[in-house]
Amino acid sequence: MENLLHLVDQYGYIAMFLFSWIVFLGLPVPNEMAAAFAGYLSEWRQFDPYTSFLFMYLGLLSYGIFGFLIGSRFGTGLLIRLINGKRTAELIRKSEIWIDKYGLFAISISYFIPGVRLAMPYIAGTSKGISLFRFLLYAVPSAGVWAILYFQIGRYFPKSFQSIVEEISSKAGIAAILIFSAIVIYFMFQLLQNRYSSLRRKKIRYRK
């Protein structure tokens, strides 16, 4: 956290933007911790919370756009060479599995899966079937929910946000899968109802 405080002292709100690039810049701090730290600073260092969140959120989106463009231009090889080859290769493999299994919804889910969210923009960029517009369509809302969650944890739990973030992150993947599965089941049921009229609940008529 000393490195993050040093960035804040030097760059102010710009540091909020840089927090979303923290892993890519080489600092060993998870994205979740950096986002919560931005919320923490808005309460304890007299930064405006709305401006702090805006800069942090724009940094998160710009990181995703950067990753997408790099993936579409150079593939995933450049990322593996730049950031811890073996670990990054494993994250890329997991992201490919997710996007093959869940399609574009994997982009939304990835923001709640530690590690996978870092590699997903690059994987989406390498896919010929995913344009930048389609990537942003699924990334922007999910990134917003993710950013609000961790930013507010930093604001409302300044003394214990580190332990809370670690606990949430350890269970985030399971929670995201369960939520996504419930959504898929719901929409499949709706699709079946629309396709097979016999499954619809018939309106009961009463004889007068």
Image (cartoon, rainbow, N blue to C red):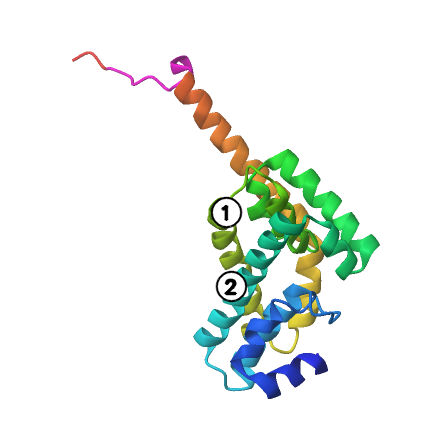
Left or right of residue 33: residue 134: left
Question: Is 143 left, or right, of 21 in this rendering?
Answer: left
Which element type, helix, strand or loop, lies under badge 1?
helix
Q: Where does label 1 land, which residue? A: 138
Mark 1 is on which residue type? Tyr
Q: Nearer the viewer, residue 70 or 50?
A: 70
Q: Residues within 10 Å of mark 1 (few under 14, many from 20)?
A: some
Residue hosting label 2: 148
- Nearer to the camera, 198 or 92: 92
* Crowding near the residue tagged with mark 2, few <14, some 14–19, many ≥20 C-alpha atoms within 10 Å: some
Residue 106 higher or lower than 43, as above or below: above
Residue 60 falls in which quadrant of the image?
bottom right
Q: Residue at x 52, y 80 (%)?
A: 13
Q: Position of residue 127 (x, y in %)?
A: 61, 40
Q: Is residue 188 visible?
A: yes
Which one is in front in this view, the residue at disc 1 or the one at disc 2?
Answer: 1
User: Which residue type does callout 2 highlight?
Assistant: Ile
Q: Taking 59 as reference, is 81 above or below it?
A: above
Q: Residue furthest right?
A: 86
x then y, percent, for residue 176 = 61, 47
**Residue pushed farthest left?**
208
Magenta range is 196-205
On screen, residue 171 versus residue 182, left or right, reads right
Question: How far apart are labels 1 and 2 at the CA level?
Answer: 16 Å
Looking at the rendering, in which quadrant would you find the N terminus? bottom right
User: At numbered mark 2, what does the secondary structure look like: helix, strand or loop?
Assistant: helix
171 magenta-colored? no
Residue 160, given in percent of the width and then of the height, sits at 66, 74
Magenta stretch, main secondary structure, is loop
